[in-house]
Image: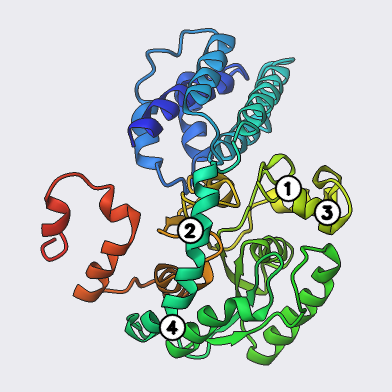
Amino acid sequence: MENNKTLYTSFTNLALKVTMSKGMTLKQSKEIVIQKFELHPFEKMIIGLIDDSKLIKKDVTVLLNECISVCEDFGPDRDYVTLNIVLERISKIEATKKGTNEIAFQVLKTFKNKVDEINKQIESPPLFNVLLETRSIIEWVSMFGIYPLIPKHKASKNKPVLLMPPYLGNDNSTAFVRHYLRSVGFKTYKWDLGVNMINSKSLPKLIEKLDEIYEKHQEKVSLVGWSGGGIFAKIIANRHPDKVEQLITIGSPVWGVKNMKTPLVRSMEFLRGKKLRERNDKFIKELEEIPAVPVTCIYTKTDGLLPWKHCMEAETLRKDIKNIEVFGSHCGMGANASVLLTVANSLNTNITGKKPKGILTKVESLFFPKFWEQKGISKFTNLFFS
């Protein structure tokens, strides 16, 4: 929250100044900016920041440079897209002064370009993480013994879920996830397209499959995609939100793919027969969009194949967008107990609106990084006492 407060203090003053440049009073500007942050997870904090207008007398260029400087200090972050969207909303407001619309559009253009430059600086996973990918063998082998011990929280019966495997993977890659989801009550479907080569030609067949499942159940279908499978899942969710219940990605690059740095780049270019920068532009553009359905992105900071920041969606855009960190390798995410629990719990929570409860659920939190990020002994006492 500390970092967010610093960034949003700077951005809020910029947004206020841009709104005022259109001829609005400070009071009107506050009301407009609050409205443009509607449904934002930090809405209450932002309202508090708006009441503090100490910097409002500064020139819009000064405020813009200050905000960009804060972004540069924090480094690459998908959440900047939320700020872009707010500025876009403000720029579309009709000005009460002639010739002042240009200021808002120029601020939006400059801010967006600078943020794009910052987000291109995400580095490839370090060599240590690449070497750690060898543990995935242990993760897959040990899962056969661990699987019977994974808790099973009862889910919504027979809700349809379509699963998509990772790059160079097939339906065997999602076997553990599918089996676990069936055991808690979901109706799972394979993708049935052989090896996933992340070819856009697979999209029409996947959409046909989505239509078939939708017609069969007469209800929306949840999409779960691992790595490259999450790319397809996100694009389908963007195209058909009327048929998609929610989107869950597992270690999937959900934005910034065109400039993404990965140790797999040469092997991917060899297999695809062309440079990664020569990808389908339409495909990449669709991937940048954020679906109008609940989104859960599961990622690991020790991912050795993909930069983990590319695997997180803009949590600050809406309250139904979540990023959940797990321990483990990229190649082992299909055989990761934390991933199985997260997928099942997220699916059920987004469908029913209710989170799993009980002591067992609290104990499960021990296996997630979020628990160990808490400071002090209180994190252990909080397991049993609210």
User: Which residue in the structure is indicated by mark 2?
Assistant: 320
Contact (Cβ within 8 Å) of mark 4 with mark 2: no
User: Which residue in the structure is indicated by mark 4?
Assistant: 144
Q: Secondary structure at mark 1?
A: helix
For the residue marked with disc 4, what is the amino acid? Phe
The tag earlier along the polypeptide, 1 or 3, is: 1
The tag earlier along the polypeptide, 3 or 4, is: 4
What number is the disc on residue 270? Answer: 3
Answer few, some or many: residues within 10 Å of disc 4's Cα (few below 14, many 20 plus, some between 14 and 19): few
Q: Secondary structure at mark 3?
A: helix
Q: CA distance from mark 1 to mark 4?
A: 32 Å
Q: Which residue is nearer to you in this view: 240 or 373?
A: 373
Contact (Cβ within 8 Å) of mark 1 with mark 4: no
Contact (Cβ within 8 Å) of mark 3 with mark 4: no
Q: Which residue is nearer to you in this view: 123 or 361?
A: 123
User: Which residue in the structure is indicated by mark 1?
Assistant: 265
The tag earlier along the polypeptide, 4 or 2, is: 4
The tag earlier along the polypeptide, 2 or 3, is: 3
